[in-house]
Image: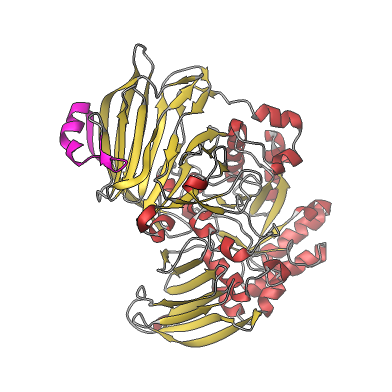
Amino acid sequence: MAGVRKGTSILWALTTVLVLATAGGTAAPSNAIIVKSPNGQVTFTLWTDADGALRYSAALDGRPVVDASSAGIVVDGVNLGTAVLTTNVTRSSTNREYPTRGVHAIAHDRSNDARIDVIRRRSDMRFTIQVRAFDDGVAFRYLVPGAGSRTPDEATTFRLPDGSQVWSHDLHGHYESTYVRRVIADVPSGDWAAPPVTYKLPDERGYASITEAALRGYAGMALQADGNGGYRAVLAHAHPVSYPYALRYKPEDVQRLSIAAKVDGPIETPWRVILAGRDLNTLVNSDIIHNVSPAPDPAVFPQGQATSWIRPGRAVWRYLDGGENTYEGLKHFTDLAVQLGFEHHVVEGVWRNWSPEQLKAFVDYANARHVGIWLWKHSRELQQADARRAFFTQCRDLGVVGVKIDFLDHEAKEVVDYYEAILRDAAEFHLMVDFHGANKPTGEDRTWPNELTREGIYGFEHRNPGPWGPHDATVPFTRYLAGPADFTPVVFGDRRKETSWTHQIATAAVFTSPLLVYGGHPQNLLDNPAVEIIKSIPSVWDETIVLPGSEIGDVAALARRRGPYWFIAIVNGAQARTLRITPAFLNAGKYASLMARDDSDNAAAVRLERGTVQAKDSLTIELRSGGGFVARLVPHEAGS
């Protein structure tokens, strides 16, 4: 932390920055407080209107990303964002780096920050708004001092610029639904949206996405449209109950979670995050969610992300694409994992039918072949701490490396607390975690690096009623902005619908998941003509670049690097197209290329090409409807 100015008065802030201020693209109010990003391109502006209500806006390049909107927190039924005065501003800055995992290897945490003290008129009720302005967006949260048990609620809104195009899905499937694209003016009042909600700014000015971060000890946030170009933040007790939760839990559970949760002691909300950038590459590479999340406890994770028992990798999984669901059949899946070079094997609930001796032998068999076993468990069975710790003890003693915990299906505070209890106890027993039936990630994998992935996405466990191509070209710029997702990609059978084999292979490189669980039968992966590429795709990346030509729902084209190896991976939407890519990201010299292209006559085929590529070359890539492309590029000095 550098550049701290404690006790800075509001008058000082106004006299130094007012001349540069903008709020919603117009001159800022006379009482505005402005926080600008280090490069000056992103601006957060806070002010009070004529009635003393807190208002804010966010801008990119001086033009609105979020128009004038309400800021505030409700405590015990009182909106603390009304009839207020701002009393003090403390400014500081942040500039640091730290290891991360997934999209890239090093996170950059660089921002200008402010703590704005607020007092309600004619009362002694005080709180603080903490703001951080990054070059790729802003984050803010509310801090309310005090003791005792109080009930917080939300008063924040987000008004989008007129003409914005929005991608969102409702809460019927919790966080497992398909995205709908609409102009913000066409989003009706009452329409629910599960964050992240991504939108394209008018006039080709860039992109933005709204979500939250550092969700701990608090209820999760969804968004509800006001029918007038905006959304209001709504906490989980007021969300419509999702179909999966109503299906699996009792009516009394539904009723209990519909009551706003109390918080003991000081109230510290999650961060409300607005990502913003001129292009999709900026959004995909944003570190804001992790930057505002707590770092891992060094007593639990002495090497942070690199703690020795945390091992990202690829996994086989018998569920979607056939295979014998028997003891011997699943042992064979372990053998196939060895042939693929995969590091993990996720086993669904059939393991509960085995004797303790069988289970021990099964895990020993896999460990002897350097394949880690993950065991599935229903979250309801682990709600009691004794039961949870007993299961984790069993896993540790068996040599199991990870657990897949399913069916949480809600983000009430009670459930959010449960996520953290699972991660804390799993860390004690050196177990990695994959959550299914889950909500959006909010930076938990920084605080608890034993969480490798979670579902919270409409993935291949579903049978999409529409085409997969547009969905696959949407989620890299919507759901995946929040963090890793367990889509269980790459299936070559009928479940892939209109998408090509090459599209399926490309999803393994486009979708981010440090535990990369393949949906396809491992024998089908081994039998595919592109098996050499499949076997070489890593589960974490050192660098990611969203390539020109990418557009939400139409096509997602990424270049990703792991060590000296580069991959170009493209998933196409509904319209056939031709892309021309110049791999200027390559270093000097020649790269040996292995490319998998669509077969124009047969979606269930792959055309392989070997050759040489340099940074100056132009690659012409023809994509069929629902098609794809994958290239592996290896510098000659690194070998092939």
Q: In which quarter of the view is residue 272 placed?
A: top left
Q: Position of residue 17 (x, y in %)?
A: 19, 38
Q: Is residue 120 visible?
A: yes
Give the magenta part as a residue range.
1-28
Position above or below: 229 against 306: above
Of the pair 128 and 241, the residue shown nearer to us:
241
Residue 127 is drawn in which quadrant? top left
Residue 83 placement (x, y as % from top left): 36, 19
Q: Nearer the viewer, residue 619 or 441?
A: 619
Please provide percent x and percent y for residue 25: 29, 43
- Residue 24 colored in magenta in the image: yes
Q: Does residue 299 sit above or below 634 in this rendering? A: above
Going by the image, does 548 lie left or right of 475?
A: left
Q: Is residue 403 left or right of residue 313?
A: right
Farthest-out residue, top: 122
**Count of marks placed on residues:** 0
Residue at the image point whose x is 42% and y is 44% from the top: 160
Q: Nearer the viewer, residue 520 or 479?
A: 479
Instruction: Report the quarter where the N terminus lies.
Output: top left
Q: Residue furthest left?
A: 15
